[in-house]
Image (tube, rainbow, N blue to C red):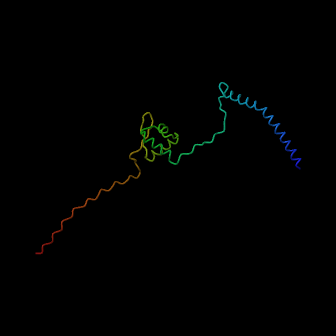
Amino acid sequence: MAEMIAQLRADIENRLREVERELAALEPLAAEKAKLEHVLASPPFSVEAPVKRARAKSVAKRRPRGANKAAVFEAVRNMPGASSGEIAAAAKVGKPQVHALLRAGVADAELATVDLGGGRKGYRINEQPETAFPAPKPAEPAVPEPAAAPAPEPDAG
């Protein structure tokens, strides 16, 4: 049994050496292939259509809940009258998210629009938001009435 295992091991080792020799002969071909691919990818040989590659997984983490809104409102506070594009650039938030946050802010009366002319809108913080249920006015402090003089006693006489 030991002889059979030794013979099998020798056969496997011989085959391994053969495979290594064949692979060594292929290394120059692999290097040449890489060079040719590089030449074809460079102008003037490059093709207009890009080669599709597997998408890299995004390593960026999501921002915490409410961070975009806070960044947008801070940008509006620092740049009153700014357009949505300017706010997006300053807040480092995507334009679709900025448009949605600005629209919601105007609907909730947290923000007000400013006409920039030419059909453009700017945004500012609404200092006095109009709400459906305005806060009641504070009650005026009660002024104590002066004490009434005692009524005169009827004269018994």
Locate residue 118 relative to residue 62 in the image: left or right.
left
Locate residue 109 relative to residue 157 in the image: left or right.
right
Residue 110 coordinates in the image, percent (x, y): 43, 46
Q: Which residue is drawn at 49% across and 40% down?
A: 91
Please say if 33 is above or below 98: above
Locate residue 45 relative to residue 9 in the image: left or right.
left
* Residue 7 found in image quarter: top right
* Residue 27 found in image quarter: top right
Q: Which residue is drawn at 67% across and 25% down?
A: 45
Residue farthest bottom in this picture: 157
Q: How many marks?
A: 0
Between residue 112 and residue 36, name the one nearer to us: 36
Q: Which residue is drawn at 71% across and 30% down?
A: 34
Which of the image's four quarters has the C terminus? bottom left
Residue 12 coordinates in the image, percent (x, y): 84, 42
Residue farthest top in this picture: 44
Q: Residue at x 63, y 40 (%)?
A: 56
Please say if 61 is above or below 155: above
* Residue 25 found in image quarter: top right
Residue 14 coordinates in the image, percent (x, y): 84, 39
Between residue 66 and residue 136, name the one nearer to us: 66
